[in-house]
Image (cartoon, grey):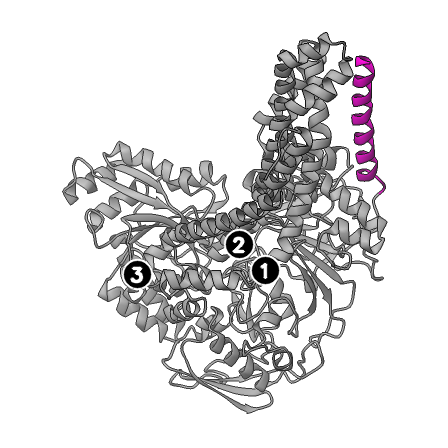
Amino acid sequence: MKANLVRFLMVGMIVISLLAMAVACGPAPATEVPSEEEAAAEEPVAEEPAAEEPAAEEPAAETRPFVMLASDVVFSLDPAEDFSMGGGSGVMVHIYDTLMTFEGEDTAEIVPVLLAEVPSKENGGISEDGLTYTFHLKPNAYFHDGSPLDAEAVKYSIDRQRALGLGPDYYWANVKEMEVVDDTTFKVVLNAPSVFFLNMIAAPWASRIVNPAVVEANEVDGDMANAYLQDHDGGSGPYILESWDRDLRQITMVRDPNYWGGWDEGPHIDEVVVRWIDESSTIRSMLEKGDADVVTGLTYEDWKALGETPGINAVSYPALFTCQIYLNNLEPPTDNAKVRQALQAALDTESIIEDVMGGMAIPMDSQASKLNAGYAPANGYVTYDLEKAKALLEEAGYPDGFEFTVKDPGLFRESTMVLEVWQADLAKIGVNMQIERVDQGAFYSALQNPDNPEIPMSYISNTMGDFPDAWSIMNYNLNPAMMSPGCCNYSQYDNPRVTELLVQAEQEFDPAKRQVMYQEIYDITAEDVPLIWPFGFKQMVAMSDKVKGYEYSLALGYQYLPLETMTVEQ
Amino acid sequence: MSRFLVRRMSSIVFVLIGISLLTFLIGHLAPGDPARLALGPRAKEESVQRLREKMGLDRPLWEQYLRYISRLVRGDFGDSLLTRRPVLEDLAIYLPASLELTAASLLLCILVGYPLGILAAHYDGKLSGELINTLSVMGVAVPVFWIGIVFQLVFYRGLELLPAEGRLPIGAEAPSSVTNLLIVDSLLAGDWKTLGVVLRHLALPAITLALPNMAYIVKLVRWKIIEARTALYVRTAQGKGASERRVLLRHILPNALLPAVTMTGMLAGAMLGGAFLVEIIFNWSGIGFYVFRAIQAADLTPVLAVTIIVALTYMVANLIVDFLYTLLDPRIRYE
């Protein structure tokens, strides 16, 4: 009996297991991604994908959608609301057209999209006083439903964005009024002249034009169709939003064959699925197996391993994002410029870039990274030199060093390791630096508390400007108008000459004169060291070597794919 | 029994009120400005203030709580600052995914864990018994995220048997949604093909979530059976000539299983709210992932909603366990 009972239990377990396996391991249905043969690669990891001619004369049939895997999260596809750095903006750039955009892998030239040309003083698009901009639209643009994309639609879109005030309205803050002149012409009058107004509105989030008819048809309780547009299409772009399956974490777009901008001859990507996955190892496995075409959101280790995998290109590009360590310029000891110089002189950026960042970073030698227009190295930039650091501390009146705390809100994966390298070197010159991990949300809420901002002695962060010009990041970091509780002069730096130069540069339309002002700012801040710049980031992308036509966009970042010109070999 | 039910239902309501108040207070006492976090550091203070007013965050705490409770009794969990949608709509998307994952894992725990525990007790001191015991220790000791990644490498990359992630393949459409439970919706639609696909996608995450919990059940069942074998009532039954099978089924198991049944009830709530790591690895859009993002963004309404749901799950599971007690032990009766 005992033996029978045992046999019964074992047989029962085996039967259950077999049943489960039979159901689970049955043949894959047609909707499953078919397996692909991996192409044998002869090249090692490439810094860039090889330039390829457009594909064959006859369009090749796609066996599955083009799949991009990313790790950001999308919360809204309403153009007046999405303010994401990756996720949403990488999708919306294909669904919505903008007035202008940036182009270029290591520079960022403004090019027109809906506009016939970019306004300038030379072509009469900008008035002599720099206050009035006249925009001319291309006459043939239309939305996905066929209704015309005209000047009224543009004004409607911008007015909606400003009325909702959900983030992207920020780019139009300097606008006093807008006026429609005719179907393809509208004027914008600014409150104050700014040479960077066009840079601002060329940003990906600034001028995504939404269809007024869609808004009016789907408005509920005065929400200006915000709820509807969070996951529905209202654009004019080359791709149409087909669906956003939140439970599957995927967005599907289909090519609009009737896109007003037309399509080049040759094959195109007809269907795109963007799926968000947080786990880097899962993303890596899927690309290796051929279930994805382009992936981002990888750890350095997974990206490096993919680069050594046949059939996969792992590429990296310097990005506009930079790491910075803010130093409180108001409180001792960091209110002393020599102390700040000493702290910078104790930062071994070369070691950090190689050993902590695995080479996925670029060195800094100025207040803006090399990728920004107007960049130039600062004269007198303090470099790594522990002897000099020690001497500076003595000059500053701290021969025995001091104690201070750096807060780390964990804005990027390696932040604590960067600080630990610095901590070890600071200890050699008698500075006892403590690292305090803080919750990001609580930290920024306290820092930007409108009544009583809590300003730390120091904290590590990463950020970029609104557009790829050195002025933007410098204005954020150095202008006293951006001090806490505002964003983002978290060092509370206030140098009247630098402020004066920033204001003058914003109104100087001559690039050569502006560059002179920039250089003076670089040189002053090289001595003042209001904050420290350990490095600029590189962004990592990996893709199947069957993907052709990929080009990195400096301004739009690694989440952006030029789908309109990309193809996939079959 | 009806009085018992009324008492338990009342206690459930009181517990939920208490939990909601505690979570509400903790959430508001924790530093963080949800409106500022939602709009980002570069948004104008006027925009942030406007959002605060729209979400009622500028009202006194007591008023915010009363507003929340009055909406809750009408089934309105409020709006999420992060997703900019009603929390109820978010839960309609994320909760079914978690329910499916939890139900599948719990089923595995019961169907595999209990028999393994009985076998481990039966073969105690022998090689097979020690093997089961060792495997259960490993199941408890090995981190769940490691198990998940290894499963992906073996079954997805190596053997190419099962998918790596998601509830459905990339690009696939879900069956017509009635419940958002893909298994149920597939059955209702008579779509056997999709059902097979759904089960294939559920397999790895369910097994990953089940394994450590199953290990607890195996160990507990084994221990309780071994302990019960030395009890007087067992020796009495054996002395009266009862067969080994009768002794096990009629005497040992009803006593030994009581603690295991209790644990199984607790596991239901634990799995529902604690599957976050499994959800991340397998890209499973459940409430664990949803509430994690909400905590990061200091978005309190989703946190409150999920806390209440998980608490309710624990209490309902305990209620079911209490009923099962009466089946296992005739001496237990509720009045």
Q: Please, which chain is the residue tagged with disc 1 on?
A: B
The answer to which of A195 and A540 lies nearer the viewer is: A540
Left or right: A158, with B255 as reference point: left
Quarter occupied by the N terminus of chain B: top right
Nearer mark to the viewer, of 1 and 3: 1
The amino acid marked with disc number 3 is Ser
Whether tag 1 and tag 2 are in contact, CB under 8 A, the answer is: yes
Q: Are marks 1 and 2 on the same chain?
A: yes
Q: Name the residue at 20% across, 42% down.
A: A392
Left or right: A334, with A148 as reference point: left
Q: Name the residue at 56% across, 41% down.
A: B274
Answer few, some or many: residues within 10 Å of disc 2's Cα (few below 14, many 20 plus, some between 14 and 19): many
Q: Is residue B200 magenta?
A: no
Residue B293: where, in percent of width, then height? 52, 51
Q: CA distance from mark 1 to mark 3?
A: 36 Å
Residue A158 in the image: above or below residue B80? below
Instruction: Please state the extent of the stretch shown in magenta in the rendering.
Output: A1-27
Q: CA distance from mark 1 to mark 2?
A: 9 Å
